[in-house]
């Protein structure tokens, strides 16, 4: 949405092939006009009302509705390091940045775009891609919020690994510059090509990053390729009289009451029915054999997060669904 441009009506244009959206040149002009009210320099501003700011109260409020026994686990993970605190305090940063200058362009943002939520995972085509992988807080919002959280986490993570302040600053500038350059690239791409844009290992190698980064990315990709369900099977499961079961590791992995397990199974069946037919048929060939509650991350600790074990054509043909 573009503030002050009658853009509220724009999404309706995309519901019909007989209506033409704004031309690219007009969109560029709208973007340039926003700089009059929100100059690019103003996006570097940082000011919060320290008198009314109460981060502890915000964090305590974010604990409402979580599993009470897991709140201490969340607090311990946040207290372990400055980066741990940043990971668990998305609500604090959201409160901070909500009052900062923004252009009013509000797509659906990640809402928690810190560095740790960017990583490798397999696409449906089984290609290894590098992208955001956490959308618990996804919501319409200012694009600037995601970028601010990303660069702030980059600086904090750099400090935690022992990088100098100059190196942290260089990393943040490189990140912001790459973000800008990617948007410029996407703006020139055809709509169809833009929708399939992604970063995979071939793309990373093509861009020819510096040697040390290339080596680290290669190591990360190798680790990601090993994180498969069949490799996790010996660690997280056991055999008993009822077949394969997820191993409990209280309080991090715990069994569910029968009623909750049944409700989760029903929800998974409903999910299968929302998939495209070919994916629904593939996943429907598996059988749900066990479910458990699992603690994940930092910010998500205490929320209802589950792991489901699905079995296919044999006991070694498995999928863990998180």
Image (cartoon, rainbow, N blue to C red):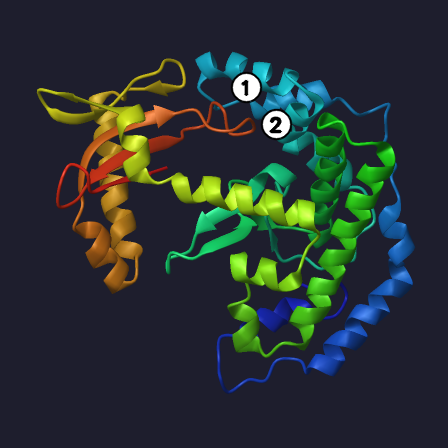
Residue of label 1? 74
Viewer-side residue, 184 vs 35: 184
Say the numbered circle drawn on residue 88: 2
Q: Earlier in the sequence, mark 2 or mark 1?
A: 1
- Asked if the residue under mark 1 is in contact with the one under mark 2, i.e. CB atoms within 8 Å, the reply is yes
Viewer-side residue, 256 vs 286: 286
Q: Residue at x 13, y 41 (%)?
A: 314
Q: Is residue 146 visible?
A: no
Asked if 243 appears above or below 208 in the picture, the reply is above
Mark 1: secondary structure:
helix
Asked if 192 appears above or below 177 in the picture, the reply is below
Q: Position of residue 234 (x, y in %)?
A: 27, 27
Q: Quadrant of the N terminus?
A: bottom right
Q: Quadrant of residue 95?
A: top right
Q: Position of residue 91 (x, y in %)?
A: 65, 32
Mark 2: secondary structure:
helix
Asked if 19 appears above or below 59 in the picture, the reply is below
Q: Residue at x 49, y 24 (%)?
A: 301
Q: Position of residue 304 (x, y in %)?
A: 40, 29
Asked if 14 appears above or below 167 in the picture, the reply is below
């Amino acid at each position: 949405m573009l503030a002050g441009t009658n853009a509220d009506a724009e999404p309706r244009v995309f519901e019909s092939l007989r209506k033409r959206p704004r031309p690219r040149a007009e969109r560029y002009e709208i973007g340039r006009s926003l700089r009059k009210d929100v100059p690019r320099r103003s996006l570097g501003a940082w000011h919060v009302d320290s008198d009314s700011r109460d981060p502890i109260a915000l964090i305590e409020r974010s604990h409402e509705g979580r599993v009470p026994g897991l709140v201490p686990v969340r607090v311990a993970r946040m207290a372990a390091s400055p980066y741990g605190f940043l990971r668990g305090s998305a609500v604090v940063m959201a409160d901070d940045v909500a009052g900062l200058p923004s252009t009013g362009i509000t797509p659906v943002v990640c809402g928690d775009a810190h560095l740790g939520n960017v990583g490798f995972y397999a696409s449906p085509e089984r290609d290894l891609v590098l992208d955001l992988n956490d959308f618990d807080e996804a919501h319409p919002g200012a694009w600037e919020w995601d970028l601010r959280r990303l660069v702030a986490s980059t600086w904090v993570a750099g400090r935690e690994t022992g990088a100098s302040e100059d190196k942290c600053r260089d990393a943040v500038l490189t990140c912001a510059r790459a973000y800008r350059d990617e948007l410029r690239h996407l703006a020139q791409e055809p709509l169809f090509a833009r929708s399939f844009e992604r970063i995979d290992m071939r793309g990373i190698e093509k861009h020819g990053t510096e040697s040390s980064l290339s080596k680290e990315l290669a190591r990360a990709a190798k680790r990601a390729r090993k994180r498969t369900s069949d490799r996790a099977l010996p660690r997280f499961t056991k055999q008993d009289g009822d077949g394969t079961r997820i191993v409990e590791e209280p309080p991090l992995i715990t069994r569910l009451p029968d009623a909750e397990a049944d409700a989760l199974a029903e929800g998974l069946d409903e999910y299968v029915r929302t998939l495209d037919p070919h994916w629904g048929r593939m996943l429907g060939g598996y059988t749900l054999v066990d479910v458990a509650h699992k603690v994940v991350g930092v910010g998500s600790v205490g929320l209802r997060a589950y792991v489901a074990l699905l079995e296919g054509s044999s006991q070694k043909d498995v999928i863990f669904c998180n």
